[in-house]
Amino acid sequence: MDINTAILSIYTISENSINELLKYCYGPIEKPKGYILTKAGTIEEYLYFVTKGIVRTFSIVKDEEVTFWIGEEGSVACSMRNYVESKPSYETIETLEDCSLYRIKAQDLQQLYKQNIEIANWGRKFAEYEIMKTENRLIAQQFLTAKERYDNLIKSQPQLLQRIPLSIIASYLGITQVSLSRIRALK
């Protein structure tokens, strides 16, 4: 996926606005699988557009990595706490595959929001999209069974099962790897 497609996958903006946004983007940046883009407890000045590969966000809870966000091509990887409040992140952001990324300074993006209404609307849609994803995951964790969460993942993102380890899938679904194996055995 090229950078223009990644930007437009969030919200359609004009070619002039894309070009204005791209003036502040740096890339492509190639990062290997397992690379840490942002470490928990730090302030990261960049947002990353994922044009190739998969990234995840996770936190350490009781000495275990808990994955709570997975982003594929077209996603923007960032700590929302950094992005919105400029405070240290709760999470670590890691590449799960070799990735091709573009980065933009959050400060530059905020300035573009003030100068260009299309880019400001793009940023609003990005935030709204992330809020909806978070709400959907929260509702799923609270009200769906482990099997229902797995079935939803199979319907919405079946390619993840081929691309990332089952231990990370299990963590993302909020279940143990043993439970995930049992659910998969029922298929």
Image (cartoon, rainbow, N blue to C red):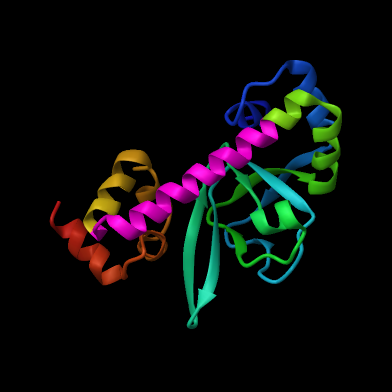
Please check the rendered image and state whether residue 143 is part of the magenta-colored stretch, yes or no.
Answer: yes
* Residue 167: % across, % down: 38, 66
Please check the rendered image and state whether residue 153 is part of the magenta-colored stretch, yes or no.
Answer: no
By secondary structure, the bulk of the magenta-drawn segment is best described as helix
Residue beneath the point at 57% across and 36% down: 74
Instruction: Write down the region rendered in magenta.
Output: 122-146
Please indicate, yes or no, whether residue 79 appears anywhere in the rendered image.
no
For this orientation, the residue located farthest to the bottom is: 62
Q: Quadrant of residue 49?
A: top right
* Residue 112: % across, % down: 83, 34
* Residue 52: % across, % down: 58, 41
Q: In the picture shown, does residue 15 fall above or below 74?
A: above
Left-right relation of 96 to 8: left
Q: In the picture shown, does residue 3 fall above or below 176?
A: above
**Viewer-proximal residue among 39 and 159:** 39
Please indicate, yes or no, whether residue 77 appears anywhere in the rendered image.
yes
* Residue 135: % across, % down: 45, 49
Q: In the picture shown, does residue 100 fall above or below 1?
A: below
Residue beneath the point at 50% across and 55% down: 69
Left-right relation of 58 to 83: left
Where the N terminus falls, by quadrant? Answer: top right
Residue beneath the point at 69% across and 48% down: 30
**Viewer-proximal residue among 182 and 87:** 87
Q: In the picture shown, does residue 168 fall above or below 54?
A: below
